């Protein structure tokens, strides 16, 4: 089997699976959309200077716990980094090449 | 008589092929921050990477993880690493782990060296990052220096005797013996007293399931005695030990029973009745007396009575009943058996309160919890409870007597010991008894005087709930202000008062008049100093026998082949004693079940070329049969040369320092290796490597 | 790859510390063992802990080598992401039908490089971090997972195929389907472990709705070096807490929850965490609200006394209710027992519920092993035979038989191994009329 054929087969398989798992895919896609929107907002706030979680929450209007969750996720996958503290809160900065 | 050339050949077969290039892999573990929070691991790795013979130098979050180990294996397989140095936690934790890793990759496991960067560096550097980092570099450099001189070694493999010795015939010892026997290994169980069962025989109904102690025991004893792999000796004690795991020679001394086994039941009763001696009965904790020819309790095993040699006056009254079955001469015999492993199950003794502690020994109204159990058993079916000739209406039970002691508050025992541990069984045992009292004698009021109620186990909390429902009155004291037991003023309805500052009611001073005070005494190890010395095992600061590590090797002692079972190791209830005993049996099966045991090869080794037979090594060695002079013939001439018996050598190195000819070294820890390590530790670090 | 039929001496169900230790103790005796774990990695609850009492060893230092030993033992067949579906008896032994769930990753090819994880666009709450951290739809379960093999969660997958594109060894395989596996085993050891009280179990304690009221398992993650935040922060807003309170018996000794029993480990883990917090946040105040402190094990009472000496505040009191102020600081309403049941309200930055232990799995329907009123496996003769269940040949170990700590789980693991070994041997000798001498051990390994 040559590479092209294989790639085609794979695409077909994925397509079939997407059809089979229509509901979960739709749900997950909605989740991803929301996630991306939030991340965009967070990155926006962090554009100029590192920010704490309450600062981001304040600027975006999102609940602080939700901001923290996203920042934690982004930190795990190297999209933001921690840069010291401001009072009782850590500061987070987005990593330069982060694109959402 | 072997030729020296033969000895030499043996030596050569163990050394490495010459000329092999030394390629060292060096790994610095972060230990999930335990090390890397203080030591700059990346820097250490970088500095080490430039040292001679080092071909890879890496760091990892947790070297002991599968990924960390896989990294080492890959370096051995793919990059030709043939010596491995890992800087991580203490070798006691993971040296074995990494030896196995190295072996899996096809390298001799002794071409591995473990450097401790945690207990010896990061944890003790008080946050001094620079200092700790430099120290780490030096320690690792020493490790690398040693690694250059490492030689492949083979563990010492010995045949394992398919027999185990169990010391102690309490529930733990019995359970252990039964499990080992069932696993197809022969067992010899020795019990010091004339009867089996230990302390459990002195209990009646037990928590957590209300089972009757002696019925359970009887059942277990039957199974043990019926098993063809088990030999039981009562009245037997260990008097000597030689050897090592897989091959211990143990000397056992057994005293006569004085009464032969075919002594008929009816005659036994008559002989006991005939004995004029009365001594306090330890089975009833001195509440009653027994004769000098006695049974521990009705239905005990063995059923044959025994003569108590310490108290028998040899008056011969029992002989008059039936002279045939009784022999009033104690003829102790000592015999030796050969076992592969030893289980220590010597059990516990209840704490004996000091004279005057909570009125103990001062007022007859103060008894211990074990005594109360016997008291209730002796009371039988009687309607009311009596003590000391008086009816009992109010009872106070005081917890934590001889347990949870605090220095400065509690008076130390005569030997200076303070029992700062919790005895684990007394809370539930006390509440179990409180419920029994309330159930059997509804008119008796029970006051429970405690600090914390520790009914932790499965089914235990029910006893607490039930006690509350049974109207047991709880009073709570603080350790700093223990209750007091004082005589009641004349004319008071009860003989003694318990004074307590009760924190369940605003810290109010309360006086409870009672007829009986029960001290919930704690659990202490039996005095087994001789045994500890003979077996070379060690007790902990609480004086219970010490395990190697509570999670990694919970039933093993530091001496290979000697394992622990039951309350000799620490307070436990029956269930826990049995679990521990079975776990000990599993360990014995692991050790002996394969027919072979392996010992570390770190033992002295004589270079026959250099040995002049001075014998100084033999003189300084403190271990039996570890090194001796033997005669060899060299070119027809007879010479004396030192010979090591590896299994008996502990690798202590005394002989190494005594030898005038540098003919002895401890394998894996040679003088050459030490010198290289010292040089490396003391070497100047290049300027670039110190400081930031 | 495991073949679809396996014959072993013992089947161990559950790969927590108890199951792993039982498997090792049997395998070291020469028995063939199959260890079936339903999650994608072994390690159980213990691998998620920070440091462990009473020795304060870092938890991975104790657990990961055991995990690795299990994975590499030549007598152990490790089957992760598998579930036993049925059990039937066959001439004194058991036949288990096991379902191997699709990982959608070829186990032989995957190297655990995690490139797929980085490529996957969707973040999901990570149960390993009690939902407070994130993982991707495809991921290696956690950093110290064994095996280090990725697993794809098809239920939360976009099916975008990005992982498949980046995998350097083409291990991602969307064609995988559930596989059936038959295991024949002489005996079974149940080590299915425990679950903790759900955070929302108690309405009085906020019913899981107060962001700064967490459970102790999450505190373990906060204290672990691999924790989600890398620091001890409160999840409400990421603040470094200055005042932390523990509420003991939150889900144990509580008739209203139907959990009358003591969970046995919470006193010790709370004290341990309090000590670790004092190390991580030297300025923080830690208060423990308790009914009884039950530090009963070897060395435990000394541990408690050390904690007191370190300045951790122990307050005897029953917490009646937890609410919060306008800054989401939890307010604890507590009846101070030592002060004649005076009721006070105290505000903290973070409250940790010392949640109790509940049975994780009910083996009754599948294994015919009854459970007791408390939901844990019933042990008919608890004193003498703590690992023997009602059904011959099936043994139980660890927290499947009731709350216990790691030390006790390891003890009972050895005991269960002993029982299983003896059972196997008795079965063998029954079927091959032989005398019981030490020499016949060869028989056992057949
Ligand atoms: C008041 C009280 C009430 C209790 N109630 C309960 C209860 O209801 N339920 C429960 O589960 N647990 C209860 N326990 C705990 C229970 O008694 C113990 O867990 C159990 O008896 C321990 O058994 P063991 O075999 O470890 O020790 P032991 O019973 O002490 O046995 C040790 C044996 O070793 C022998 N021995 C000692 N030294 C030597 C030597 N050098 N050589 C040879 N033999 C030696 C001794 O003679 C003894 O027979 C209670 C304890 C107390 C104090
Ligand atoms: C917050 C907290 C802190 C703690 N800290 C400590 C401490 O410091 N020291 C200490 O000694 N103890 C501590 N403990 C207790 C400790 O976690 C337990 O004693 C121990 O983890 C129990 O191990 P286990 O193997 O019995 O159960 P688990 O760890 O629950 O393992 C059970 C395993 O079985 C698997 N499983 C379940 N059902 C099935 C099935 N049907 N088929 C296949 N697999 C299945 C599960 O996925 C799991 O991997 C703590 C507990 C808590 C809650
Ligand atoms: S079990 Fe209870 S009575 Fe015994 S020492 Fe411990 S706390 Fe005190």
Image: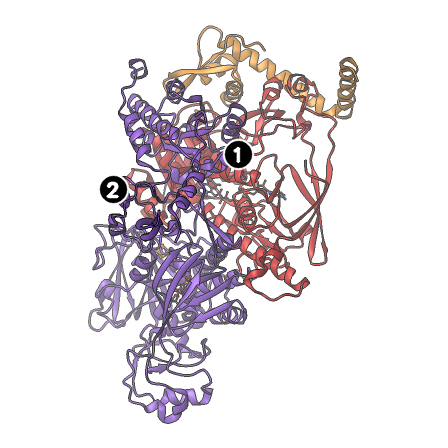
Chain colours: A orange, B purple, C red
Chain under callout 2: B
Q: Is residue C341 above or below residue B673?
A: below
Quarter of the image with the C terminus of chain B in it: top left
Whole-percent x, y for residue C219 in the image: 45, 33
Task: Specify which label sits upstream in the sequence, 2 or 1.
Answer: 1
> Would residue C389 appear left or right of B213 to someone viewing this image?
right
Which residue bears the numbered disc 1? B106
Q: Residue at x 26, y 25 (%)?
A: B682
Q: Nearer the viewer, mark 2 or mark 1?
A: 2
Q: Residue at x 44, y 53 (%)?
A: B456
Q: Is residue C185 above or below residue B178?
A: above
**Residue closest to the far bottom:** B320
**Ligand 1 positioned in quadrant:** bottom left
> Would residue B382 appear left or right of C423 to someone viewing this image?
left
- CA gap, disc 2 to disc 1? 35 Å
Quarter of the image with the N terminus of chain B in it: bottom left
Which residue bears the numbered disc 2? B657
Whole-percent x, y for residue A19 in the image: 78, 22
The kind of secondary structure element at disc 2 is helix
- The answer to whether residue C418 shows anywhere in this view is yes
The kind of secondary structure element at disc 1 is loop
Q: Which mark is residue C252?
A: none
- The answer to whether residue C59 shows anywhere in this view is no
State whether label 1 is within 8 Å of ligand 2.
no
> Would residue B235 appear left or right of C32 to someone viewing this image?
left
**Residue closest to the far top:** A48
State whether label 2 is within 8 Å of ligand 1.
no
Nearer the observer, B202 or B470? B202
Q: Which quadrant of the view contains residue C240?
A: top left
Nearer the observer, B459 or B587? B587
Whole-percent x, y for residue C416 in the image: 55, 54
């Amino acid at each position: 089997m040559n590479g092209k054929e294989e790639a085609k087969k794979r695409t077909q398989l994925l397509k079939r699976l997407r059809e089979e798992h229509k509901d979960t895919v739709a749900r997950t896609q909605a989740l991803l959309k929301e996630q991306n929107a939030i991340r965009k907002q967070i990155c926006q706030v962090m554009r100029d200077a590192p920010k704490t979680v309450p600062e981001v929450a304040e600027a975006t209007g999102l609940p602080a716990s939700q901001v923290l969750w996203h920042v934690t996720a982004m930190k795990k996958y190297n999209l933001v980094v921690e840069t010291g503290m401001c009072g009782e809160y850590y500061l987070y900065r987005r990593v330069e090449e982060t694109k959402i | 008589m072997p030729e020296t050339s033969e000895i030499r050949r043996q030596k050569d077969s163990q050394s490495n092929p010459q000329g092999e290039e030394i390629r060292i892999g060096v790994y610095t573990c972060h230990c999930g921050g335990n090390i890397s929070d203080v030591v700059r691991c990346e820097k250490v790795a970088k500095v080490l990477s430039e040292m001679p013979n080092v071909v890879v130098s890496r760091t990892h979050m947790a070297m002991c993880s599968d990924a960390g180990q896989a990294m080492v294996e890959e370096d051995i397989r793919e990059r030709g690493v043939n010596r491995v140095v890992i800087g991580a936690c203490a070798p006691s934790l993971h040296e074995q782990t990494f030896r196995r890793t190295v072996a899996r990759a096809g390298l001799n496991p002794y071409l591995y060296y473990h450097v401790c960067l945690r207990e010896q560096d990061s944890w003790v550097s008080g946050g001094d990052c620079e200092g700790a980092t430099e120290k780490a570099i030096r320690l690792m450099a020493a490790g690398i220096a040693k690694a250059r001189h490492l030689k492949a070694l083979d563990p010492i493999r010995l045949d394992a005797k398919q027999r185990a010795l169990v010391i102690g015939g309490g529930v733990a010892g019995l359970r252990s013996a039964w499990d080992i026997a069932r696993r197809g290994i022969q067992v010899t169980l020795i019990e010091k007293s004339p009867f089996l069962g230990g302390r459990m025989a002195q209990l009646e109904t037990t928590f957590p399931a209300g089972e009757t102690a002696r019925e359970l025991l009887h059942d277990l004893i039957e199974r043990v005695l019926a098993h063809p792999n088990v030999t039981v000796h009562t009245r037997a004690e260990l008097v000597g030990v030689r050897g090592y795991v897989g091959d211990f020679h143990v000397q056992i001394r057994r005293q006569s029973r004085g009464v032969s086994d075919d002594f008929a039941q009816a005659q036994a009763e008559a002989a006991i009745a005939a004995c004029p001696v009365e001594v306090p009965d330890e089975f009833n904790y001195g509440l009653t007396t027994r004769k000098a020819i006695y049974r521990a309790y009705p239905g005990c095993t063995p059923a044959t009575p025994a003569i108590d040699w310490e108290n028998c006056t040899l008056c011969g009254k029992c002989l008059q009943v039936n002279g045939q079955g009784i022999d009033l001469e104690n003829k102790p015999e000592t015999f030796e058996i050969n076992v592969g492993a030893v289980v220590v199950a010597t059990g516990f003794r209840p704490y004996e309160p000091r004279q005057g502690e909570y009125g103990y020994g001062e007022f007859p109204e103060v008894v211990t919890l074990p005594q109360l159990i016997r008291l209730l058993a002796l009371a039988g079916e009687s309607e009311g409870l009596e003590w000391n000739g008086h009816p009992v209406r109010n009872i106070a039970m005081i917890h934590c007597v001889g347990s949870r002691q605090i220095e400065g508050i509690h008076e130390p025992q005569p030997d200076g010991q303070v029992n700062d541990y919790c005895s684990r069984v007394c809370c539930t045992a006390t509440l179990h008894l409180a419920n029994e009292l309330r159930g059997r004698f509804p008119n008796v009021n029970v006051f429970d005087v405690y600090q914390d109620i520790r009914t932790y186990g499965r089914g235990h909390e029910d006893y607490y709930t039930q006690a509350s429902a049974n109207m047991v009155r709880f009073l709570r004291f603080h350790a700093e202000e223990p209750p007091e037991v004082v005589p009641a003023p004349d004319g008071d309805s009860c003989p003694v008062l318990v004074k307590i500052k009760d924190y369940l009611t605003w810290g109010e001073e309360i006086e409870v008049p009672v007829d009986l005070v029960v001290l919930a005494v704690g659990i202490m190890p039996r005095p087994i100093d001789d045994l500890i010395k003979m077996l070379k095992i060690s007790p902990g600061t609480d004086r219970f026998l010490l395990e190697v590590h509570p999670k990694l090797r919970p039933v093993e002692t530091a001496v290979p082949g000697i394992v622990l079972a039951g309350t000799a190791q620490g307070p436990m209830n029956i269930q826990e004693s049995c679990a521990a005993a079975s776990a000990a049996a599993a360990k014995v099966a692991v050790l002996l079940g394969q027919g072979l045991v392996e010992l570390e090869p770190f033992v002295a080794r004589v270079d026959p070329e250099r040995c002049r037979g001075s014998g100084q090594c033999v003189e300084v060695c403190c271990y039996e049969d570890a090194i001796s002079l033997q005669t060899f013939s060299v070119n027809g001439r007879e010479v004396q040369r030192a010979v090591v018996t590896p299994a008996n050598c502990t690798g202590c190195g005394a002989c190494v320092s005594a030898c005038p000819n540098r003919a002895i070294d401890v394998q894996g820890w040679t003088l050459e290796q030490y010198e290289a390590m010292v040089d490396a530790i003391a070497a100047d670090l290049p300027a670039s490597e110190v400081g930031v | 790859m495991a073949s679809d039929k396996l014959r072993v001496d013992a089947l161990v169900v559950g790969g927590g510390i108890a199951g792993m230790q039982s498997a090792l103790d049997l395998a070291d005796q020469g028995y063939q063992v199959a260890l079936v774990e339903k999650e994608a990695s072994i390690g159980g609850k213990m691998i998620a802990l920070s440091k462990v009492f009473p020795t304060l060893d870092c938890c991975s230092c104790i657990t990961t080598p055991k995990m690795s030993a299990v994975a590499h033992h030549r007598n152990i067949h490790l089957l992760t992401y598998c579930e036993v579906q049925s059990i039937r008896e066959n001439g004194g032994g058991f036949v288990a039908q096991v379902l191997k769930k699709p990982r959608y990753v070829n186990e032989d090819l995957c190297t655990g490089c995690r490139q797929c994880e980085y490529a996957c666009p969707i973040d999901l709450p990570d149960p390993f971090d009690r939902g407070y951290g994130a993982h991707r739809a495809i991921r290696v379960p956690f950093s110290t997972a064994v095996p280090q093999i990725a697993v794809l969660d098809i239920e939360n997958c976009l099916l975008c195929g990005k992982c498949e594109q980046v995998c350097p060894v083409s291990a991602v395989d969307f064609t995988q389907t559930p596989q059936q596996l038959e295991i024949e085993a002489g005996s079974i050891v149940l080590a299915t472990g425990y679950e903790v009280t759900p955070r929302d179990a108690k309405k009085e304690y906020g019913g899981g709705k107060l962001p700064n009221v967490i459970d102790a398992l999450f505190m373990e993650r906060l204290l672990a070096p691999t924790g989600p935040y890398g620091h001890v922060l409160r999840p409400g807003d990421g603040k470094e807490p200055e005042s932390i309170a523990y509420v003991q018996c939150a889900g144990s000794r509580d008739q209203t929850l139907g959990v009358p029993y003591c969970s046995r480990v919470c006193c010790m883990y709370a004290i341990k965490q309090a000590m670790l917090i004092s190390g991580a946040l030297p300025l923080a105040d830690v208060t423990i609200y308790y009914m009884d402190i039950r530090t009963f094990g070897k060395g435990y009472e000394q541990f408690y006394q050390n904690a007191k000496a370190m300045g951790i505040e122990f307050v005897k009191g029953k917490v009646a209710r937890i609410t919060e102020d306008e800054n989401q600081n939890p307010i604890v309403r507590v009846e101070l027992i030592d002060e004649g049941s005076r009721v006070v309200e105290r505000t903290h930055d973070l409250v940790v519920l010392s949640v109790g232990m509940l049975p994780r799995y009910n083996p009754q329907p599948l294994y015919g092993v009854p459970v007791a009123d408390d939901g844990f496996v019933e042990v008919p003769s608890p004193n003498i035979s703590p690992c023997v269940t009602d059904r011959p040949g099936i043994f139980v170990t660890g927290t499947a038989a009731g709350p216990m700590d790691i030390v006790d789980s390891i003890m009972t693991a050895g005991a269960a191994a002993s029982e299983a070994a003896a059972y196997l041997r008795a079965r063998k000798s029954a079927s091959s009329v032989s005398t019981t001498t030490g020499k016949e051990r060869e028989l056992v390994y057949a």
